[in-house]
Image (spheres, rainbow, N blue to C red):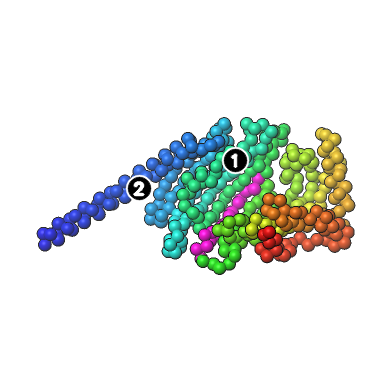
Amino acid sequence: MKKIAKTLGRVHKAVWVILILLIVVRVFMPAGIKYGINWYMDNKMDSYKGKIEDFDLALYRGAYQIEGLKIWEKVKSEKMPLIAVKQMDISLAWRGIFKGKLLGDLKVDGMKLDLVDSKDSKQKQMGAGQDWKTVIGKLIPIELESFRMANSEIHWLNNDFKVPVDVVVDRIMVSATNIKNTNNSKELLPSKVEITARVQKDANLTAGAKMNILAKNPTFESKITMNRLNVTKLNDFFLAYVPISFSSGHVSLLAEISAKDDKIAGYVKPFIENLDVMSSEEKFDSPKRFFNEMSLATVNLILRNPNNKTMAAKLEFEGAMKGPDFDTWGAVWSSLRNGFVEAMKKKLDNDVSIKDVPKKN
């Protein structure tokens, strides 16, 4: 009995020691990991610096959270980050573990990416000069089985002009599942990606794709639609980069793109409805702008369909991923047909799949 009592006493002490160690780890490890991440981003990144505000562990579900991530160019202020993220949650994908694979599920909430264009290299911030794969590996040291993003936005900024340029895609929602094919699907494209967003706080953008992320080269089938973006909301952008401006009109885009074996095939169909380029009260600040707007107004007058007041075309392409061949004459003919023969239907053709991609030479 005494031996049993001694053994139970040792077990009891061992349990208490383990509990105390777990408590110590739980209390002090987050602070240590936070320090390590911040030290790395402050000292080891190439052209950028970064920091996180908080790091927390959720041991009961095998997860950790990163809050207040910011990354900015070293020559710039922390107040102008290239990327800022409110929260990242990385947890173990138990469905992967049950199949012998150590994988993770990543959720990102409140990501903001600011791409700054400028003629002044000191003002420009496009993410160049940094090994982002290594940075991501430090923050997420595990391969992913799923990825979800919510409440996020991307900005294209240029402050070189009197009226600053800010093209924004916000309300970004992304869902990518079965990235490592833990379902053991025999399909060529086992992973599924869905994206929704809003362009210039006006038009809805949706994209869906089936992918094989495990393939050596990009392998996917995708469909993309953007419906009725008010073109006047892009006037600041076009005045800065063309120059040209619009009085009214809406643009929609439809596209199907597939790729495999470093080859690509697909099409893009733009629709421009009720376009009005020149107004009676417009003042031209340069001959170039006058010429651009006069030319576009003339093209619109000739090519728009008389019934629905819409210009449309279908630009098809296929070939090498880095430099596909574009069917320019086919696009011209489709535009003429829309204007003079039959209005192009504003819908996906559903005629591009992985089977339509040119075979590898």
Magenta segment includes 98: no
The quarter holding residue 221 reads bottom right
Q: Tell whether 210 sits left or right of 165.
A: left
Given residues 214 and 314, the one toward you in this image is 214
Q: Tell whether 352 sits left or right of 301.
A: left
Q: What label does residue 26 carry, if any?
A: 2
- Which region of the structure is painted magenta? 168-183
Instruction: Please name the residue shown 49% across and 42% down the image.
Output: 68
Q: Is residue 341 above or below residue 113?
A: below
Residue extending farthest to the left is 2
Residue 223 visible (yes or no): no
Q: Which residue is mark 1?
A: 127
The quarter holding residue 28 reads top left
Residue 12 x, y percent position in the rendering: 21, 55
Quarter the C terminus occupies: bottom right
The amino acid at mark 2 is Arg
Q: Tell whether 274 sits left or right of 41.
A: right
Q: Nearer the viewer, mark 2 or mark 1?
A: 1
Give the prevailing secondary structure in the magenta stretch.
Answer: strand
- Of mark 2 and mark 1, the one earlier in the sequence is 2
State the separation of the CA atoms marked 2 and 1: 35 Å
The amino acid at mark 1 is Gly
Residue 275 x, y percent position in the rendering: 81, 50
Residue 215 x, y percent position in the rendering: 58, 58
Instruction: Please name the residue shown 24% across and 52% down the image.
Output: 16
